[in-house]
Amino acid sequence: MADLKELVSAVVEMREDEAMALTKKLLADGTPPLAVFDAYQAALEEIGKRFEQQLYFIPELIMSGEMMKAASEIIKPLLADQSGGQGKQRLGKVVIATVEGDIHDIGKNIVAMMMDLGGLEVRDLGVDVPADRIIAEAKDFGADIIGLSGLLTLAFDPMKQVVEKLQAEGLRDKIKVIIGGGQMDEQVCKYVGADAFVTDAVAGVNYCKGWLA
């Protein structure tokens, strides 16, 4: 029987066909979709570490991103089914983006989808988004919350820039900031100046809904 550790290894070692086959088998065997997502997130963390150690380079990041996108096409409908289609009443508005310098998006995409299913109105800005654009979009959208995603440690400073620009615009007290990614922790949250950090999609959605309740 396939297990999640095998999936992590396949993704990290760039065995694309094996990773997709394992993803499908795990889900068919009844593994919770979020557990499969967590395995991909663990693989992304290791790939990020190898990139920073110069063991992996841009081609590996791009290939891992493609694997994540392919997996998300399978995982997202299953998560939608679990939601039961609830949450049509909009609780508030969230702008979400992967910050400048980072191109990973599977976690952001799943969070954005789960927020939408959970009753939040979401504007997804994509990947590698500069701080100025995030602020401009948040103002235009009337955002209650800004969600910043990043896998690599180089995402920390761009996240901090968003908070600093919010303060400069006089909006920091009006807009909550949540950061997400495998390497986020309390220390990074304090450095960035965010209101909360998360390392999984469900926690991110719950934080936002709690703030807007």
Image: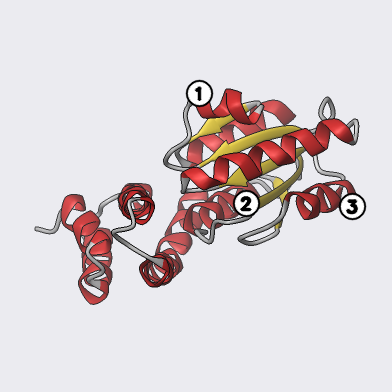
Residue 23 image position (x, y, % from top left)? 27, 64
- Residue 203 rendering spot, x and y as whole percentages: 51, 34
Precedes in sequence: disc 2 or disc 3: 2
Extreme residue in the bottom direction: 17
For marks 1 and 3, the one nearer the N-term is 3
| Residue drawn at the location 51% of the way across and 56% of the way down | 80
Residue 117 placement (x, y as % from top left)? 61, 51
Instruction: Compute the Cα span from label 2 to label 3.
Output: 18 Å
Dot 2 crowding, Cα within 10 Å, few <14, some 14–19, many 20+? many
C-beta proximity under 8 Å, tags 1 and 3: no
Q: Which residue occupies 89% across, 52% down?
A: 140
Quadrant of the image containing the N terminus = bottom left
Task: Give the residue at x 79% y 33%.
Answer: 175
Q: Secondary structure at mark 2?
A: loop
Rate crowding at label 3 as few (under 14), some (14 to 19) or many (20 or more) other CA atoms within 10 Å.
few
Q: Is residue 112 visible?
A: yes
How far, Cα to Cα, is label 1 from label 3?
Answer: 31 Å
- Residue 26 sits in quarter: bottom left
**Residue under numbered circle 1:** 187
**Nearer the observer, 187 or 96:** 187
Amino acid carrying mark 3 in the image: Asp
Q: Quadrant of the C terminus?
A: top right
Pointer 3 residue: 140
Q: Quadrant of residue 159?
A: top right
For residue 61, the mark is none
How did the renderer colour the structure?
secondary structure
Left or right: where does residue 142 sit relative to residue 68?
right
Q: Secondary structure at mark 3?
A: helix
- Write down the residue under mark 2: 99
**Amino acid type at image mark 2:** Val
Q: What residue is rendered at 32% in x and 62% in y?
A: 56
